[in-house]
Amino acid sequence: MALKLIVTSTRDSRVGDAIAQHIAPLIAEGAGREVEVLDLVEVNLPPANEPQMPSLGNYQQEATKAWAKIVASADGFVFLTPEYNGFFTAAAKNAVDTVYAEWGGKPAAIVGYGFGGANRAVPLLAQLLTNVNLQVAESSVQMPFGDALGEEGLDVDALVAPHVDALRALGAQLA
């Protein structure tokens, strides 16, 4: 089993997938275990498509059944989130809300990124994760774009570099 790093941004212009590739090895190093990147673009969960509430666990849709197996197979989770208008992404909310019991009792952590490092989105996402009985790490890693964002786009190395130790420590919290 492994930790799952969930890329929650699904926009065409996103940078979360590139950030995930940079931070997954650091989190894995700290945790001493494999970190698998799960991209919600690839998971492609339809919104709220089950006839019954997820807490009943009676999933009918194939996409939900597949997602439930992925979530159930994980040792823990890292949610990588940008901030959209002060909140985490709709895709993150949908992914969490699609299943229920499969999250229960597992450790989770949050890494935020954006102009403000997702400082408003991170506590809101932590509240959601707590509501589905995930054991959310007290600390998070928030990576503001700052000087990493230039005329040529985002320099992911420059974004991640100041947070290397914090990302390893986050992995250790999940171990």
Image (cartoon, helix red, strand yellow):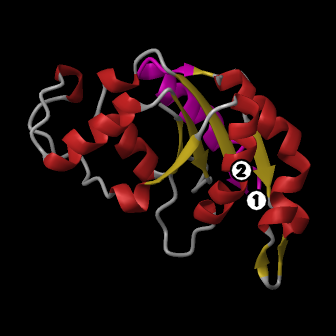
In the image, taking residue 152 as reference, residue 94 lies left or right, namely left
Provide residue 154's location: percent of width, then percent of height: 76, 72
The residue pinned by badge 1 equals: 115
Earlier-in-chain disc, 2 versus 1: 2
In the image, taking residue 39 as reference, residue 154 lies left or right, namely right
Report the magenta residues as a range.
113-135
The residue pinned by badge 2 equals: 23
Task: Say which amino acid is labelled 2.
Answer: Ile
Q: Residues within 10 Å of mark 2 (few under 14, many from 20)?
A: many
Provide residue 102's location: percent of width, then percent of height: 33, 25
Q: Residue furthest bottom?
A: 152
Instruction: Please say whether residue 133 is one of the residues in the magenta stretch.
Output: yes
Whether residue 88 is visible to the viewer of this picture, yes or no, is: no
Residue 44 to residue 149: above or below: above
Q: What residue is drawn where x is 77% and y is 39%?
A: 167
Instruction: Say which quarter of the image contains residue 175.
Output: top right
Instruction: Please say whether residue 132 is one of the residues in the magenta stretch.
Output: yes
Comparing labels 2 and 1, the label whose residue is closer to the camera: 2
Q: What residue is drawn where x is 37% and y is 34%?
A: 71
